[in-house]
Image: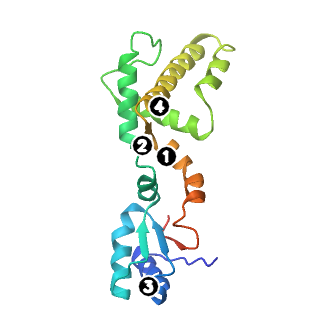
Amino acid sequence: MVIYTTKTTSRISQITAELVAPFARDLSTRYYVFCEDKNTLSLESAIAQKTGGSFNVTVTSFSRYLSQGLSSYKVLSKTGSALTVFRIMSDLSSSLARLKLTNNASISSSIYQLIAQLKSAKVTPMDIEKIVGEERGALSTKLKDINAIYAQYEKVLKEENALDSNSFYSLMPAFIAGDENLKGARVIFAGFS
């Protein structure tokens, strides 16, 4: 593995194009260039300019790559996830003791961020439920509210055949391992900050 570091994204595009150019017309080898969403167009342009065009080079971001392979799922953005939490909190408002919606809807965004952190740490609603039984007072009621929102959030995702960004990216290792298009391909990771 070779690692190049640069100070600018335009230099990343140049280096990537230089790496791909000698093989751009060899249709027996596929190239995948993974980059941040914001850099796909500049990388595609640099490669096209250097090679005159190529049919064996795919420039994509991780989210686009996964979206193409997991098209049967509805994928929620962070905003979509926060809005889902808002809807859940609104539906559960009469049963929530501490975490009530106010005129400031940013609480739903904060609760979603908490859910995202819990999911990335592999903490499930069942794990929280076990902890709740051991606690008393304000902490106990907050944990019960969080657990109710988190459990309902997971239920909504399942019912709507949806994934949030945490679940979405957790599927990547298995998807990459099973992707026949990547077998034998040359893969470049370009421009991650």
**Residue named by callout 1:** 168
Q: Amino acid at mark 3?
A: Ala
Contact, mark 2 vs mark 1 (Cβ under 8 Å): yes
Q: What is the spatial separation of the Cα atoms under label 2 and label 1, in whole angstroms? A: 9 Å
Contact, mark 3 vs mark 2 (Cβ under 8 Å): no
Residue 17 vs residue 176, the one in the foreground = 176
**Residue named by callout 4:** 158
Contact, mark 3 vs mark 1 (Cβ under 8 Å): no
In the depicted structure, whether residue 48 falls above or below residue 116: below
Q: What is the spatial separation of the Cα atoms under label 3 and label 1, in whole angstroms? A: 31 Å
Earlier in the chain: of badge 2 and badge 1, it is 2
Contact, mark 3 vs mark 4 (Cβ under 8 Å): no
Q: What is the secondary structure assignment of the residue under circle 1?
A: helix
- Picture quarter with the N terminus: bottom right
Q: Residue at x 43, y 76 (%)?
A: 57
**Residue named by callout 2:** 73
Q: Quadrant of residue 133?
A: top right
Q: What is the spatial separation of the Cα atoms under label 4 and label 2, in whole angstroms? A: 10 Å
In the depicted structure, whether residue 71 falls above or below residue 36: above
Q: Which mark is residue 24?
A: 3
Q: What is the spatial separation of the Cα atoms under label 3 and label 2, in whole angstroms? A: 33 Å
Please tell me how crowded label 3 is: few (under 14), some (14-19), or many (20+) other residues with Cα within 10 Å.
many
Q: Quadrant of residue 162?
A: top left
Task: Give left or right: position of 54 versus 184.
Answer: left
Q: Viewer-nearest of labels 2 and 1?
A: 2
Earlier in the chain: of badge 3 and badge 4, it is 3
Q: What is the secondary structure assignment of the residue under circle 4?
A: helix
Earlier in the chain: of badge 4 and badge 1, it is 4
Counting from the top left corner in percent of width and height, residue 135 is at 66, 14
Q: What is the secondary structure assignment of the residue under circle 3?
A: loop
Q: Quadrant of residue 156?
A: top left
Counting from the top left corner in percent of width and height, residue 163 is at 45, 40
